[in-house]
Amino acid sequence: MFRSLLQQYHPKAFYHGDRTLPTIALTFDDGPHPRDTPQVLDVLAEHNVYATFFLIGRSAEQHPQTVKRIFECGHQPALHCYRHLPFPLENASTLKGQLDRSRTAIARACGIPPETIRHARPPYGFFTAKTLSLLEEWGYRLVLWDNMPLHFLQPARRTIAQILDRTAPGSVIVLHDGKGHGAKVAHILEIVIPRLKAKGFEFVTIEQMQNSITGETK
């Protein structure tokens, strides 16, 4: 309900892809983590699935090798925040500085231009119309979701059921690859990825999903 109210007031925010296409996006928040993230990457590689990782800038500075591995495995690096404080609680200059610092750290680890990292997901999904306006002004694209099971608060079997029941064409699924969730999330992925593929879904990155809508090539 909360998400749908946000969507009503902020129609420019990205919640899902094209509902007529069988593509879905796996996304991960709160990384990189040197122990948890590799467990997730191993499962994704096993199933030949590419995802989008919304990274915390401070952690990216501390663990550049993990960020590099995310990119070298073919996944899309994106921005979550620098210190996991809701965007509306930061003043504009501080927020811009933290986003720019975060993407610079990520880009340096990956060996790519900072401006190629454009997608940002606000901590807890909290944002205002002003936040969205600022992100657009600075060249960032706000990304939310339509499927985020609370895997960090409930048994894995319940999360698995929710992912399988709620995933639809264009779905953006959120899991977390840090803060001790790596092994549990890897287990969840081992089960849901083959079942979602069996339903005919194709996994894409957020960039690919948005480009299929806008017609952009990069």
Image (cartoon, rainbow, N blue to C red):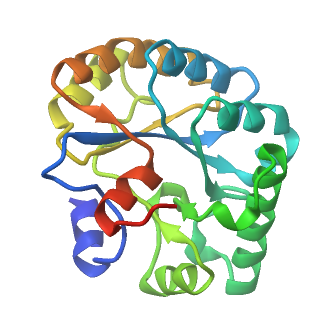
For residue 193, which quarter of the picture? top left
Determine if residue 63 is in view: no
- Tell me if 39 is positioned left or right of 49 in this view: right
Give residue 111's position: percent from left, percent from top.
81, 48
Residue displayed at 58% across by 31% down: 177
The vertical placement of 124 against 31, above or below, is below
The vertical placement of 209 against 67, above or below, is below
- Nearest to the observer: residue 208 or residue 24: 208
**Which quadrant would the N terminus be assigned to in this image?**
bottom left
- Numbered-mark total: 0
In the picture as drawn, the residue positioned furthest to the front comes out as: 217
Residue displayed at 21% across by 26% down: 164
Give residue 3's position: percent from left, percent from top.
28, 61
For residue 135, which quarter of the picture? bottom right
For residue 197, which quarter of the picture? top left
Give residue 130's position: percent from left, percent from top.
49, 87
The vertical placement of 175 against 106, above or below, is above
Give residue 89's position: percent from left, percent from top.
62, 75
The vertical placement of 91 against 172, above or below, is below
- Nearest to the observer: residue 177 or residue 119: 119
Determine if residue 198 is in view: yes
- Nearest to the observer: residue 194 or residue 60: 194
Residue displayed at 76% across by 26% down: 34
- Tell me if 13 is positioned left or right of 182 in this view: left
- Tell me if 55 is positioned left or right of 214 in this view: right
